[in-house]
Image (tube, rainbow, N blue to C red):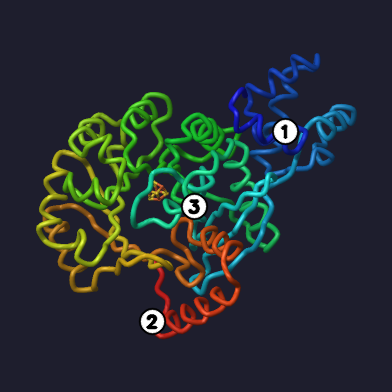
Amino acid sequence: MSDKDFLQLVSTSGRPSAFDYDLSDWKAWCIANKLPRFVAGQIYCWIFQKNTCSPEKFSNIPLSIRETLIREFSWDLPIVDSRLVSLDTSEKFLLKTHDGHLYEMVLMPYDNRATLCISSQIGCKMGCTFCQTGKMGLTRNLTSGEILGQILLANISMAANGSDKTVSNIVFMGMGEPLDNFDHVVKACSVMIDPIGFGLSKSRVTVSTSGLIPEIQKLGEVLPVRLAISLHNADEVKRSAMMPVNRKYSLAELKKVLLTYPAPARTGITFEYVMIEGENDSIADAKKLVKFLHGIKAKVNLIPINRFPGIEMEASSAERIRAFQEYLSHRDIPAPVRYSRGQDISGGCGQLAAKRKEELDVDPRLIHQTRRKHKRESISEGVRGI
Ligand code: SF4
């Protein structure tokens, strides 16, 4: 727990967050406080298995220990700045850290499961040209507790709304490059897949990266959860222009590491491919993509770009997306088209927090005009879900 982000959090609230502690941290705390080690497992289960964030409810733990827990730790969940429900039932939460930074998560309930798209950083330093979070730059990493706090909050929110579901699938596709916050993300993932933590299967936790090669390799060694690659172009020069990370870690090197990643044989690796008119959506682009994927068990999600203020790019037309999709599927590469859920509530990565940040920074009259314009546009276009 020597990370500077954690120290920053401690100094802000005055106490460490209980959600930053994993089982080994609780064991160390019990030893330091001369308590039996099994108490560590009890505390850990109350938090992550039972989603109980108030020590006063830890009924099998003696009162004196509960009082110490209340005194020594912060038990605050992320602050909900606002919550928007989309026409497609996804819920977008704009959250605030206890030192005042905005980030977001999107909860997508389905009939038989609930997927949570979570953030790993405040902003992002990777600078992808098509991404609103990339335009914000990086403010700081989220701690493992702030990452896990999103799941706790989602589960508590679903229960409060009368649902018997809990989060069953996690995707790191909110704000941030998760592998740029490697230690906190791995610590959080370990709690997600721990049978006495959140108890999710490894195949239901997906880390999505822009392609940080050393960290992909490390992830495969320490905690091989599912991997998604934000690819978006299979041409070295064009990808470098869209995604600065490609100038450091080329497609050729990326492919080498992906060929050795221990991905599940059934599902392989998912590739995210945002469809941008005239940029990466031609048949020539599809050919390069097929060549890049040769030898990798792959699925490609085709995602028409979500427009946001200040971006010139347009989503590919339905015809171009269909032709691109057919080219891939005729070569045995599944390529579903994914419309970002919650487009009517700024469902794309970082859009809500970026919009709110803009609101805090710009003339309120301009916001009002922009909102009216967007409202008119979304009414005339209709809203589509996955
Ligand atoms: S696409 Fe992902 S890696 Fe790129 S700037 Fe956005 S959040 Fe960062």
Q: Earlier in the sequence, mark 2 or mark 3?
A: 3
Q: In the depicted view, which residue is nearer to us: 47 or 93?
A: 93
**Which residue lies at the image location 56% right of the left edge and 78% below the top edge?**
368
**Which residue lies at the image location 75% right of the left edge and 24% below the top edge?**
39
Mark 2 residue element: helix
Residue beneath label 2, please?
381
Of badges 3 and 1, nearer the viewer stands: 1
**Which residue lies at the image location 27% right of the left edge and 62% below the top edge?**
275
Please identify the residue farthest to the front as the structure is shown: 363
Q: Is residue 40 left or right of residue 177?
A: right
Measure how far apart labels 3 and 1 are at the Cα level: 28 Å
On the image, the x and y values in percent for residue 176 come to 46, 45
Q: In the depicted view, which residue is nearer to us: 166 or 176?
A: 176
Dot 1 amino acid type? Ser
Residue beneath label 1, please?
11
Quarter location, residue 326: bottom left
Measure how far apart labels 2 and 1 are at the Cα level: 47 Å
Residues packed near mark 3 inside 10 Å, few (<14), some (14 to 19) or many (20 plus): many
Position of 383 relative to 245 (above/below): below
Position of 38 relative to 247 (above/below): above
Q: Earlier in the sequence, mark 3 or mark 1?
A: 1
Residues packed near mark 2 inside 10 Å, few (<14), some (14 to 19) or many (20 plus): few
| Numbered badge on residue 117 | 3
Dot 3 amino acid type? Cys
Q: Is residue 59 left or right of residue 229?
A: right
> Badges 2 and 3: C-beta atoms under 8 Å apart?
no
Quarter location, residue 362: bottom right
